[in-house]
Image (cartoon, rainbow, N blue to C red):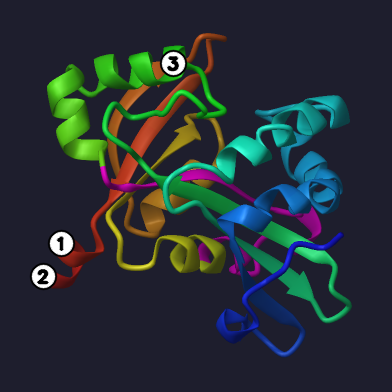
Amino acid sequence: MRAQPRDEDASEIDETVSLHTIDGEFIPSLADELLDPYTEAFSGAPYRRTRQDARLALTGLPFAAKQPEATARVVRDADGTLLGAAWGWVTPPGLRRADNPYSEGLYDRVRVAMGGTWLCEQTLVSRFEVVELFVRPSAQGLGYGQKLLESLVGDRPSWLLSWAESPALSAYLKWGWARQCNFESGTGTQLCLLTKDPSELRRR
């Protein structure tokens, strides 16, 4: 079953590609449709994820759907084929709820990297947390990733994590995201935490 978009929020990116909003409750129904493009997007360096890795990652969608103000955006071509997607939620007090699909250990590392619990929560709580963003390799370089991200976060203060070795990091910096800190994940991956404050950017 295809996830139900809010048609009134659909918009054309160009003559052949459209952007759709998926409300939180429908995010889990994206899983089957996401598997191929997710696998393709993360199969290369530095991620090197297998199809099984992708399938496991997508089992978190039912939990993602329950997070505060969870929402997703998808890009489709004229035939309805999914080219890319992004989703996330608003970070709650404490950074995560018990039903968050990501481990407490990850958020503990975020707290340390940000200078401690108090400063971390002052910075990140109530921001929109971009949890995932990807575009099929065949559709990369066409601006769809930026459109997905801008549509997902809108004018909300936001944050995300990026692999330090990922080409996406330079794109985020180009799009106005600010690097706050670097830290190592539990598996040894170097991660960067970035934030964006659209209201601050408008005042400059």
Disc 1 + disc 3, Cβ < 8 Å? no
Mark 1 vs mark 3, foreground winner is 3
Q: Amino acid at mark 1?
A: Glu
Circle 2 crowding by C-alpha within 10 Å: few under 14, some 14–19, many from 20:
few
**SS type, badge 3:** helix
Residue 22 position by quadrant: bottom right
Residue 107 placement, left or right of 203: right
Instruction: Name the spot of residue 114 as percent of width and height, x first.
Output: 23, 24
Image quadrant containing the N terminus: bottom right
Instruction: Give me the disc on residue 200.
Output: 1
Where is 105 relative to 7, above or below? above
Type of amino acid at the residue the image marks with label 2: Arg
Marks 2 and 3, Cα distance to the nearest angstrom?
36 Å
Mark nearest the camera among 2 and 3 is: 3
What is the spatial separation of the Cα atoms under label 1 and label 2, in whole angstroms?
5 Å
Q: Earlier in the sequence, mark 1 or mark 3?
A: 3
- In the displayed structure image, the side of residue 168 where residue 120 appears, left or right: left
Query: As drawn, is 79 to the left or to the right of 98?
Result: right
**Foreground residue among 129 and 5:** 5
Image position, residue 63 (x, y; %): 60, 36
> Where does the magenta region start and end?
126-146
Task: Look at 82% across and 63% down and name the residue there.
Answer: 2
Q: Among all residues in the image, which is located at the extreme bottom?
A: 15
Badge 2 is on which residue? 203
Q: Is residue 119 above or below residue 80?
A: above
Real-space CA distance between mark 1 and mark 3, rounded to the nearest whole angstrom: 30 Å
Q: Which residue is mark 3?
A: 104
Q: Quadrant of the C terminus?
A: bottom left
* Residue at 48 percent of width and 62 percent of height: 152
Q: Is residue 90 magenta?
A: no
